[in-house]
């Protein structure tokens, strides 16, 4: 046991990026399960077989660690959005791909939804501390705006569309069906994880967005 622990310590010392990533992953789990107020740095240290001192060395405080968790989770979705290569697709197909990605990402990343819900409980206090999140999010709006303008030039999208409105339209349903899945499932006796229901909802969202923006 001690040999294994010593090996882990040496591995962390030799690979600080992996150490940082391991702490972030453990912190995500802790913040999802306990919220910001209930999360304990001790518990995060235990999850990574490291020390509070190591965590404070990398992140400074529990609150700063929480900010870095937000940056990571928002960064994951923004980086993947960037890799969709929307500019290579016809405008209508590009929108459909972005809507489908948004739906699938929320569906398969419950931690992201939970952390964002926690941040809204705190009135976005910690998002305000990270210009990186705002910058990443402005980039996705810029990419979406280019698709909308291209579709307008192609004659398939109507003019005068607010980019943020479209972003919110595609994100809101994707978020809601995950954030409220337990209450919806119980109240309406429906299983939102059912593949047929997910496929229906994804297609419904694509149609809703496309019908809103079409010329």
Image (tube, grey):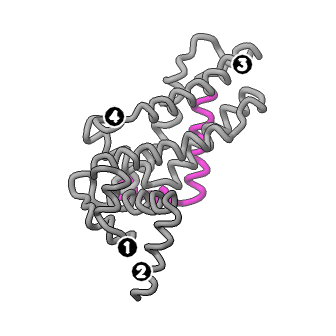
The quadrant the C terminus occupies is top right
Q: Which residue is mark 3?
A: 150
Q: Is residue 69 above or below residue 47?
A: above
Cβ atoms at labels 1 and 2 below 8 Å apart: yes
Q: CA distance from mark 2 to mark 3?
A: 56 Å
Residue 159 at x, y = what percent?
A: 63, 11
Dot in front, 3 or 4: 4
Q: Is residue 154 left or right of residue 99?
A: right
Q: Where is the N terminus found, in terms of image quarters?
A: bottom left
Q: Secondary structure at mark 4?
A: helix
Among the two numbered marks 1 and 3 on one chain, the one whose residue lies closer to the N terminus? 1
Dot 1: element: loop
First-in-chain label (1 vs 2): 2
Task: Give the CA separation, mark 1 to mark 4.
Answer: 29 Å
Sequence-first tag of 2 and 3? 2
Q: Residues within 10 Å of mark 4 (few under 14, many from 20)?
A: few
Q: Spatial distance from mark 1 to mark 2, Cα to Cα? A: 8 Å
- Residue for badge 1: 49
Q: Earlier in the sequence, mark 1 or mark 4?
A: 1
Question: What are the residue bounds of the magenta stretch?
Answer: 184-211
The Cα atoms of the two marked residues, 3 and 4, are separated by: 34 Å
Q: Earlier in the sequence, mark 2 or mark 4?
A: 2
């Amino acid at each position: 046991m001690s040999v294994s622990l010593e090996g882990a310590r040496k591995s962390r010392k030799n690979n600080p990026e992996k150490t940082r990533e391991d702490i972030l992953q453990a912190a995500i789990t802790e913040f999802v399960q306990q919220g910001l107020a209930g999360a304990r740095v001790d518990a995060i240290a235990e999850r990574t077989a490291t020390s509070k001192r190591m965590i404070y060395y990398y992140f400074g405080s529990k609150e700063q660690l929480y900010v870095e968790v937000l940056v990571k989770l928002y960064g994951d979705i923004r980086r993947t959005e960037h890799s969709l290569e929307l500019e290579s697709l016809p405008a209508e197909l590009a929108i459909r791909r972005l809507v489908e990605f948004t739906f699938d990402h929320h569906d398969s990343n419950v931690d992201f939804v939970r952390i964002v819900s926690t941040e809204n409980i705190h009135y976005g206090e910690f998002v305000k501390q990270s210009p990186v999140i705002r910058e990443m999010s402005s980039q996705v709006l810029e990419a979406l705006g280019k698709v909308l303008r291209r579709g307008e030039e192609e004659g398939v999208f109507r003019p005068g569309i607010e980019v943020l409105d479209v972003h919110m339209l595609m994100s809101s349903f994707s978020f809601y069906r995950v954030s409220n899945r337990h209450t919806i499932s119980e109240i309406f006796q429906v299983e939102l994880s059912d593949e047929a229901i997910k496929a229906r909802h994804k297609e419904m969202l694509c149609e809703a967005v496309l019908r809103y923006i079409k010329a």
